[in-house]
Image (spheres, rainbow, N blue to C red):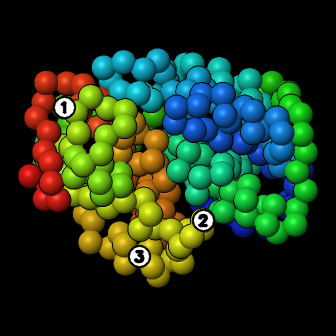
Amino acid sequence: MAYPLVGPESLAATLPRRGLYDVRWRLGDPDFGRRAYGEAHIPGAVFVDLDTDLSGPPGRDGRHPLPDSGAFLTTLRRLGISEDTDVVVYDDATGIVAARMWWMLRSIGHQRVQLLDGGIQGWMGSGLPVEAGTVEPEPSMYPGPIAFSGVVKIDELAGRQLVDVRAQERYRGEYEPVDPRPGHIPGAVNLPTTEALVGDRFAESDRLTAVFGDLDDPVFSCGSGVNACHSALAMVAAGYPMPDIYAGSYSEWSRSERPVATGAEPA
């Protein structure tokens, strides 16, 4: 099982023997990632679209529901990923987008996947090269069928320790840019993704241990099931087992008839 993080220099030393994937994305600008990728990406990297490659169609089950496992298998093959590919994913947002692909691969049992700590900014800040244009991968034959594990559904949350990793103001219901009702799922505690970071990098393991040490078999939730994967990665980096994810997250919950809570307290 690969340690979930890799630094720029270590990655550079192992290229081109790695499958490299650029997962940049911006809320409200669906073309941002592909545009930024075309302008400059790590040499050899293939672009992955969060909305179309790593998510199913949005609806009542959330803004970024998991895709059908068969569709994801097709995506893996198109991206050139086989069962023995050493995958590295990156973005420009402290890993909160690229971690979705890391988690999805780990969820189907693909252990050889890491996230570039510091993203493309850390890569460029280390004086390492970038290239423009588009990389078209050679299709592969990833074995199937596959299935996602560690996924908790909306009706399976009762009795679980639910951890909402959104920013505090969204958790409290003071600000909600995309979902229909502000607030949080009643009973969820708040542990923002930023607690696992120091600047653009993940904190050292002792800090991560302190952040996650009080959690007991948690289920991570966020806005649409993306940022929760970042916290799952951070918990694994701290040496804990892979936690479960509520894939629909608040975007599904707030579209249901279920109650929401506001304020700083879980209830």
Is label 3 in contact with label 2 (beta carbons under 8 Å)? no
Disc 1 and disc 2: Cα gap in Å?
35 Å
- Estimate the x, y position of residue 224 in percent, counting from the top left: 39, 36
The type of residue carrying mark 3 is Thr
**From the viewer's perspective, is residue 163 above or below residue 252?**
below
Please state which of residues 178 and 219 is positioned toward the viewer in this rendering. Answer: 178
Which residue in the protein does label 2 denote?
Answer: 200
Q: Residue at x 37, y 72 (%)?
A: 211
The type of residue carrying mark 2 is Asp
**From the viewer's perspective, is residue 38 above or below residue 20?**
above
- The residue mark sitting in front, 3 or 2, is 2
Whichever of labels 3 and 2 marks the residue nearer the N terminus, that label is 2
**From the viewer's perspective, is residue 104 above or below residue 190?**
above
Which residue in the protein does label 1 denote?
Answer: 155
Tell me: 229 left or right of 213.
right
The type of residue carrying mark 1 is Asp
